[in-house]
C-alpha cells in the first residue's frame, strides 16, 4: 500500500507527511506537490516543504500544470478569460492543483486498491472530510485524515527544528499571495505588501470585466485601503475578519503606527 500525502507546502500537510512516515515508513509514502510560480508562492514556503522532505528522507513528487513556472493565478485567468469556473471554485485551483492531481492518479495509480490519499484537514472540518472522502470513494480510492482521526505524535514542525513559513505571521494559510478566493482583508495585505500583484489583478479585472471579490472591483477598494493605512493598521490576514474590520472602524488615525508589525518581516 502506497500513501499519497497531498503535500501543499503548508504546515498541516507537513504534519501529515511526518505522521505518515512515522506510521507507514518512508518507502511507502509519496509527497505529492503541485509547484506554484515563485511570483506568488513565497520562497519560505518552498524552503519549508523542502526541509520537511529532507528531514523525512522522501523526495517530493511533482504533478505540475504546464507553464506553472510563469503562469500565476492572475496570468492564468487572463489566458482563459475568467476568474472562476463556478461559485466557490476558483479557476486557478482547478488548473494548478486539481487537474494535475487527477492526471497523476490516472497515470500512476491505476491499481486503486494499492493507494490511500492523505489530507491535512483538522477535526473541526467535518464537512470537508466527508465531501473529500465521498468523492474519492466514488473514484475508487481510500482517504485518510491523520490530523483529525489518528493519535497524533507531533503538533508543530518546530518540535523537530523546522521553522514554519514566515508567511504564517501574516496569512492564515500557505496559499498564493493574491488568492482569487480571498476577500477584502487578504487583498488589503496584497495592496500593502505586494502592490505589483495587486496592480496586475486590478488590470486583469478591467480586461476580463469581472471582479475578483464579489460586488466590488479592486480599483474601488484603493480609497478604503488608503484610509486603513492612514490609521496605522498593520496588514494581516490571520485575524478574525469581524475583529479586523471592527478594529479598523474603531481606530483613530495613526493610533497604532508606532507599534511593531509582523509585515516588516515579510
Image (spheres, rainbow, N blue to C red):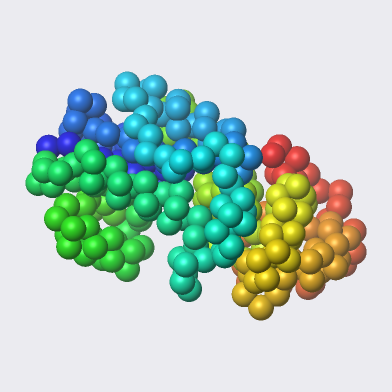
* Total count of labels: 0
Residue displayed at 38% across by 53% down = 98
Image position, residue 36 (x, y; %): 51, 41
Image position, residue 238 (x, y; %): 60, 56
Using the image as rendered, state which of residue 63 and residue 142 is in the foreground.
63
Using the image as rendered, state which of residue 18 and residue 226 is in the foreground.
226
Res 217 seen here: yes
Image position, residue 68 (x, y; %): 51, 40
Would you say 37 lies left or right of 221 here?
A: left
Residue displayed at 29% across by 54% down = 148
* Residue 236 vertical position relative to residue 220 in the rendered view, above or below: above
For the C terminus, the quadrant is: top right
Would you say 83 lies left or right of 14 here?
A: right
Using the image as rendered, state which of residue 257 and residue 58 is in the foreground.
58
Where is residue 217, by image quadrant?
Answer: bottom right
Where is residue 6, by image quadrant?
Answer: top left
Image position, residue 113 (x, y; %): 9, 46
* Residue 214 vertical position relative to residue 239 in the rendered view, above or below: below
Residue displayed at 46% across by 41% down = 66
Res 152 seen here: no
Using the image as rendered, state which of residue 216 and residue 143 is in the foreground.
216
For the N terminus, the quadrant is: top left
Where is residue 21, by image quadrant?
Answer: top left
Would you say 138 lies left or right of 205 here?
A: left
Amino acid at each position: 500500500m502506497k500513501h499519497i500525502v497531498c503535500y501543499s507546502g503548508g504546515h498541516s500537510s507537513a504534519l501529515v507527511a511526518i505522521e505518515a512516515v512515522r506510521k507507514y515508513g518512508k518507502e511507502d509514502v509519496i509527497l505529492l506537490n503541485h509547484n506554484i510560480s515563485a511570483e506568488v508562492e513565497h520562497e519560505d514556503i518552498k524552503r519549508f516543504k523542502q526541509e520537511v522532505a529532507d528531514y523525512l528522507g522522501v523526495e517530493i513528487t511533482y504533478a505540475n500544470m504546464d507553464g506553472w513556472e510563469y503562469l500565476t493565478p492572475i496570468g492564468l485567468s487572463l489566458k482563459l478569460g475568467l476568474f472562476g469556473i463556478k461559485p466557490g471554485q476558483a479557476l486557478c485551483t482547478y488548473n494548478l492543483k486539481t487537474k494535475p492531481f487527477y492526471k497523476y492518479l490516472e497515470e500512476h495509480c491505476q491499481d486503486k486498491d494499492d493507494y490511500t490519499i492523505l489530507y491535512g484537514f483538522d477535526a473541526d472540518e467535518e464537512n470537508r472530510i466527508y465531501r473529500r472522502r465521498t468523492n474519492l470513494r466514488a473514484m475508487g480510492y481510500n482517504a485518510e485524515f491523520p490530523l483529525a482521526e489518528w493519535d497524533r505524535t507531533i503538533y508543530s514542525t518546530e518540535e523537530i527544528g523546522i521553522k514554519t513559513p514566515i508567511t504564517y505571521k501574516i496569512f492564515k494559510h500557505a496559499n498564493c499571495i493574491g488568492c482569487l478566493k480571498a476577500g477584502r482583508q487578504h487583498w488589503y495585505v496584497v495592496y500593502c505588501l505586494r502592490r505589483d500583484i495587486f496592480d496586475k489583478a486590478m488590470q486583469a479585472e478591467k480586461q476580463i470585466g469581472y471582479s475578483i471579490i464579489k460586488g466590488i472591483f479592486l480599483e474601488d477598494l484603493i480609497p478604503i485601503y488608503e484610509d486603513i493605512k492612514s490609521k496605522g493598521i498593520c496588514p494581516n490576514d490571520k485575524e478574525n475578519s469581524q475583529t479586523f474590520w471592527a478594529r479598523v472602524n474603531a481606530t483613530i488615525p495613526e493610533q497604532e503606527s508606532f507599534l511593531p508589525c509582523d509585515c516588516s518581516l515579510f
